[in-house]
Amino acid sequence: MTSVDSKSLVAKIETGLKNCDDCDKQIITCVRIKKQDLTPDEIIDSRVFYWSAFNGSNKMMRLMILQRKWSPFIKAFRNRSIVSGAILGGNIETIRYLLTKYKYESAGHVDL
């Protein structure tokens, strides 16, 4: 890929991100946003969610986001977030699901 191609690719990504801000996203008010917010049992659950994202289980992601109201940016396994698990697992659909369908807000901290 030439430098001209990479510049045009970056421009397309930036344009896509700007347009995505205008999309209608469901707002999720996260009650758990950091690993320190989790109980020992919830830390175990966060690892399950990490591996579910790694393996592309959107059903488990819906449970985590809609029912538990957890941020997908919580460090869950080896200091990696749930989003990182989806990236490392190569699950593009899970990444799209996590990042384009919802807007995450914090319940008492700075917005995510």
Image (cartoon, helix red, strand yellow):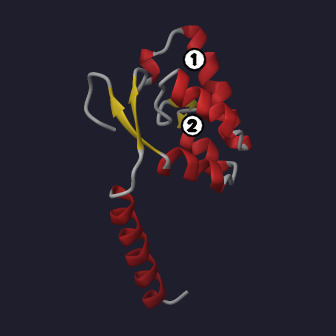
| For residue 48, above or below residue 10 | above
Could you say where residue 76 lies in the image, as x and y percent from the top left? 56, 29
Q: Quadrant of residue 57?
A: top right
Asked which secondary structure carries label 2, the reply is helix
Residue lying at 43% horizontally and 17% vertically, measured from the top left: 36
Q: 76 left or right of 93?
A: left
Could you say where residue 20 lies in the image, as x and y percent from the top left? 39, 60
Q: 12 left or right of 64?
A: left
Query: Would you call the spot at circle 1 few (<14 residues within 10 Å), some (14-19), or many (20 or more)?
Result: some
Could you say where residue 10 lies in the image, as x and y percent from the top left? 41, 75
Q: Quadrant of the N terminus?
A: bottom right
Residue lying at 42% horizontally and 76% vertically, measured from the top left: 12
Earlier sequence position, callout 2 versus callout 1: 1
Name the residue carrying label 1: 43
User: In the orientation shown, which residue stands out farthest toward the front?
Assistant: 24
Looking at the rendered structure, which numbered label has been put on residue 83? none
Q: Amino acid at mark 2?
A: Ile
Q: Quadrant of residue 112?
A: top left
Residue lying at 41% horizontally and 47% vertically, measured from the top left: 25
Nearest to the observer: residue 48 or residue 59: 59
Nearest to the observer: residue 19 or residue 9: 19
User: In the orientation shown, which residue stands out farthest toward the top?
Assistant: 40
| For residue 4, above or below residue 25 | below
Name the residue carrying label 2: 82
Asked which secondary structure carries label 1, the reply is helix
Q: Amino acid at mark 1?
A: Ile
